[in-house]
Image (cartoon, rainbow, N blue to C red):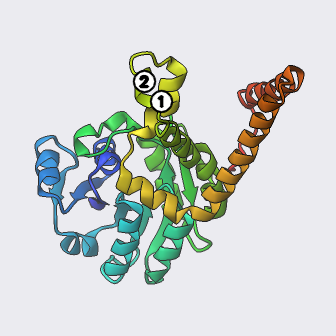
Amino acid sequence: MKQTMVIVGLGLIGGSLALALKGFEDFEIVGVDVSQPTLRYAAEHGVGDRVTEDAAAELPQADVVALALHPQGIVDFLARYRDAFKPGALVWDVCGVKTAILEAAQVLPGTVDFIGCHPMAGTEFSGVEHAFAEMFRDSHFLLVPRDDSRPEHIALLERLAAYIGCKDVCRTTAQAHDALIAYTSQMMHLIAVSVCDDPELFQCRGFEGSSFRGCTRVAALDVGLWTQLFSLNQPALLAAVDRLLDNLQSYRDALASGNRAALAEKLAHSAARKREMNLPGPDLLA
């Protein structure tokens, strides 16, 4: 018997999921969005098996629900539809913060299994028109199950991750996830936008090297999305930024001292750490 998987939110990630999951096991992939232009584009380009704006009509029949909204949108959706999900259904999300989302999922009845997920993929673009089925190829799929998560649902998500092209599934905790993402992703975005705040930015137009372009690539971000991501992960992100400020101050002190030997020693230390980081090592998330 065919099952139904509803993907709520057909933006870049949700749209890419709907494309990547076509043909997955015996699921019909149903895309849900409130934007009429998004729904028209999705219908015209085969994003999912079918699309609709009526979440309330789909949720009671959905065996699996993937929430691909902005973070606050997921929180609000869970609160609004808490009693609409099918008993026994699996609900999962793709959000880049986990503590806030798992807390929001506590409103769901005990008959609904919620598992936090984060396929670590994306681009600097947004919208369904930029979605593509290969989005998740060779990416990590971070999995944050709850203590009462059903083993069959965890196994389903592991098969799903493999089907969309993820290279592995890493189980972790919400706190470990948020600390990792604060450092490796969110702080990098803060660095990028901070570099673009420099008054000399437009004086270098046309003369940017690859290191500058690489550093600032993500600065042209989705403001609404990243405002929510930063805000909902405030404790972990503040800790990461404070460590960065300490490191920058240390480099500034070494530079201001005029002591080339001290500066070279710091550079050598940092360069060695980067080279060590590039070596194969244990999976710290496992």
Mark pair 2, 1: CA separation = 5 Å
**Horizontal arrangement in the rendering, residue 164 relative to residue 241 (left or right):** left
Judge by depth and name the residue closer to the eye, 122 or 186.
186
Q: Is residue 60 above or below residue 248?
A: below
Judge by depth and name the residue closer to the eye, 265 or 214.
265
Q: Is residue 270 visible?
A: yes
Label of residue 90 in the image:
none
Judge by depth and name the residue closer to the eye, 65 or 27.
65
Query: Dots 2 and 1: beta carbons under 8 Å?
Result: yes
Residue 265, percent across and down? Answer: 87, 25
Identify which residue is drawn at 56% across, 41% down: 191
Identify which residue is drawn at 31% across, 44% down: 126
Identify which residue is drawn at 24% across, 45% down: 128
Residue 217, percent across and down? Answer: 45, 32
Identify which residue is drawn at 60% across, 52% down: 182
Judge by depth and name the residue closer to the eye, 233 or 101.
233
**Horizontal arrangement in the rendering, residue 126 relative to residue 251 (left or right):** left
Q: Which residue is mark 2?
A: 203
Q: Residues within 10 Å of mark 2 (few under 14, many from 20)?
A: few
**Horizontal arrangement in the rendering, residue 77 relative to residue 45 (left or right):** right
Q: Which residue is mark 1?
A: 200
Q: Amino acid at mark 2?
A: Gln
Q: Is residue 146 above or below residue 230?
A: below
Q: Amino acid at mark 1?
A: Glu
Secondary structure under the numbered disc 2 in the rendered image: helix
User: For residue 145, which quarter of the picture?
Assistant: bottom right
